[in-house]
C-alpha cells in the first residue's frame, strides 16, 4: 500500500520557484512517500528522492541505498513478552529477515508458545496486540530469505530444543536411552494429566450435582413462595370481588331509592302543574264570561238610549241645511213669512247688458 500525503502537481509547481536551500527545508516539511509492509511496519521516504514511477505497484518503487529511510513500528513484534520487551525494533537491520526477529525474541529465555510461523505470510494477533513480521525493506533480502524457507513452517518449541544443545554429539545408544527416558517421563506426565483430568471431572461432577441440588431446592422454595403468593392473590381477589358486589348492591339500593323519590316528586310536580293549568283555565273562562256580560250590558244600554233618542228626536228642530245660500243663514227651517207678490226683475231678461 502506498500513501502520498501531498499532491505531486502542487509540489512540482512550488519546487520550480525555490532554490536548493529552500528546497531542502520544503522537502522536510512538505510530504513523504510511505510504503507499508504489514499493518505494523512501514517505510517513509522524502518525495524529493523518489524516482518517477509509471505504475502504482510496490515492485516499481525504487529507493536508493544512500537515501535515508525512516522505519516506524506501531508496537513491538516480540512473541514472548511484547509489553516488557527490552528490544525496541527501531533499526533497519532488525527487520531485514525473519531470523533477526526470532533471535531477538530468544534473548528472553522464556518458553515460547507452540505457534506455527510462516515467513511468507503476515498475521496479526488481536488479543495480545503482537505482530509476526515478513521479510521487509529490500528485494535482495526477500530473495535471500525466500530461497531457504519457501515452504517451511517453524515451531517455537522445536527451535528452543534445538537451540539448547547446538554442539551435542551423542551415540545412537545414548539417543535411545534419552528417548526412552523422555518417553517414560512423557508417560508419567500423561498419567498425571489423566489423574488430574479425572479429579477435575469428579470435582466438576460433584460441583454440578451440588449446583443441581441447590437449583432444585431453590426451585422448590420458589414454587412454595409462588404458591403462597398465588393463594394470597386469590384471597385478595375474592375479597375485592365481595367488596365490589357489596358496593354494587348499595349503589343499586341508593339508585332505587332515588328513583322512587324522583317518581314521587315528579307526580307531585305534575299534580301541581295540572292544578295550576286548571286554575288558569277557570280564570280565563271567568274573564271571558265577564267580558261577555259587559258587552251584553253595554249593548242593552245602547239599545235603550237609541230608543229614547228616537222617541225624543221628532220634537227637536231639524238641522240647518248647508250649501243652500240664504237658506243656510236662517236660524231655523220653519217658514215664518211668505210674500204674496212674487218679485219681478226690472230689467228684461232678453236684453244684453250695455258695456262701458
Image (spheres, rainbow, N blue to C red):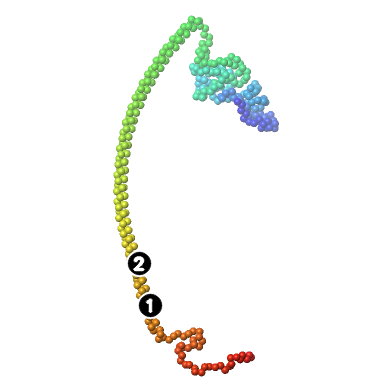
Residue drawn at point x = 31 percent, y = 33 percent: 228
In-image side of 161 versus 206 (left or right): right
Picture layout, residue 247 above or below residue 273: above
Q: Relative to the observer, which residue lies in front, 326 or 254?
A: 326
Q: Relative to the observer, which residue lies in front, 218 or 43?
A: 218
Q: Quadrant of the N terminus?
A: top right
Find residue 241 and report its horizontal and vertical position in percent.
31, 41
Q: Which residue is mark 2?
A: 284
User: Is residue 73 visible in this depiction of the protein?
Assistant: no
Residue drawn at point x = 52 percent, y = 8 percent: 168
> Marks 1 and 2, how far apart in space?
27 Å
Q: Relative to the observer, which residue lies in front, 308 or 239?
A: 308
In-image side of 11 versus 276 (left or right): right
| Secondary element at tag 1 | helix
Q: Mark 1 or mark 2: which is in front?
A: 1
User: Is residue 239 visible in this depiction of the protein?
Assistant: yes
Q: Quadrant of residue 207?
A: top left
Q: Quadrant of the C terminus?
A: bottom right
| Secondary element at tag 2 | helix
Q: Which residue is mark 1?
A: 302
Amino acid at each position: 500500500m502506498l500513501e502520498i500525503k501531498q499532491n505531486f502537481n502542487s509540489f512540482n509547481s512550488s519546487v520550480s520557484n525555490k532554490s536548493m536551500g529552500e528546497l531542502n527545508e520544503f522537502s522536510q516539511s512538505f510530504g513523504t512517500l510511505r510504503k507499508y509492509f504489514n499493518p505494523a511496519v512501514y517505510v517513509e521516504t522524502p518525495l524529493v528522492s523518489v524516482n518517477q514511477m509509471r505504475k502504482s505497484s510496490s515492485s516499481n518503487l525504487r529507493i536508493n541505498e544512500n537515501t535515508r529511510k525512516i522505519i516506524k513500528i506501531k508496537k513491538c513484534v516480540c512473541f514472548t513478552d511484547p509489553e516488557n520487551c527490552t528490544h525496541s525494533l527501531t533499526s533497519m537491520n532488525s527487520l531485514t529477515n525473519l531470523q533477526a526477529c526470532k533471535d531477538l525474541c530468544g534473548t528472553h529465555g522464556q518458553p515460547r508458545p507452540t505457534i506455527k510461523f510462516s515467513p511468507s505470510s503476515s498475521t496479526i494477533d488481536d488479543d495480545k496486540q503482537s505482530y509476526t513480521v515478513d521479510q521487509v525493506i529490500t528485494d535482495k533480502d526477500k530473495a535471500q530469505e525466500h530461497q531457504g524457507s519457501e515452504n517451511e513452517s517453524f515451531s517455537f518449541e522445536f527451535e528452543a530444543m534445538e537451540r539448547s544443545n547446538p554442539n551435542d554429539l551423542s551415540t545412537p545408544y545414548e539417543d535411545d536411552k534419552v528417548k526412552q527416558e523422555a518417553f517414560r517421563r512423557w508417560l508419567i506426565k500423561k498419567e498425571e494429566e489423566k489423574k488430574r483430568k479425572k479429579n477435575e471431572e469428579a470435582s466438576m461432577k460433584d460441583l454440578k450435582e451440588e449446583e443441581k441440588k441447590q437449583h432444585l431446592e431453590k426451585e422448590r422454595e420458589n414454587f412454595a413462595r409462588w404458591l403462597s403468593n398465588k393463594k394470597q392473590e386469590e384471597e385478595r381477589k375474592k375479597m375485592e370481588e365481595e367488596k365490589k358486589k357489596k358496593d354494587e348492591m348499595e349503589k343499586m339500593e341508593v339508585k332505587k331509592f332515588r328513583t322512587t323519590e324522583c317518581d314521587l316528586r315528579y307526580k307531585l310536580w305534575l299534580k301541581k302543574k295540572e292544578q295550576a293549568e286548571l286554575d288558569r283555565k277557570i280564570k280565563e273562562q271567568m274573564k271571558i264570561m265577564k267580558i261577555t256580560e259587559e258587552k251584553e250590558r253595554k249593548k242593552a244600554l245602547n239599545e235603550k238610549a237609541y230608543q229614547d233618542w228616537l222617541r225624543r228626536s221628532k220634537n227637536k228642530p231639524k238641522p240647518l241645511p248647508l250649501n243652500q245660500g240664504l237658506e243656510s243663514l236662517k236660524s231655523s227651517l220653519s217658514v215664518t213669512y211668505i210674500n204674496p207678490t212674487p218679485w219681478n226683475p226690472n230689467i228684461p231678461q232678453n236684453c244684453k247688458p250695455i258695456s262701458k
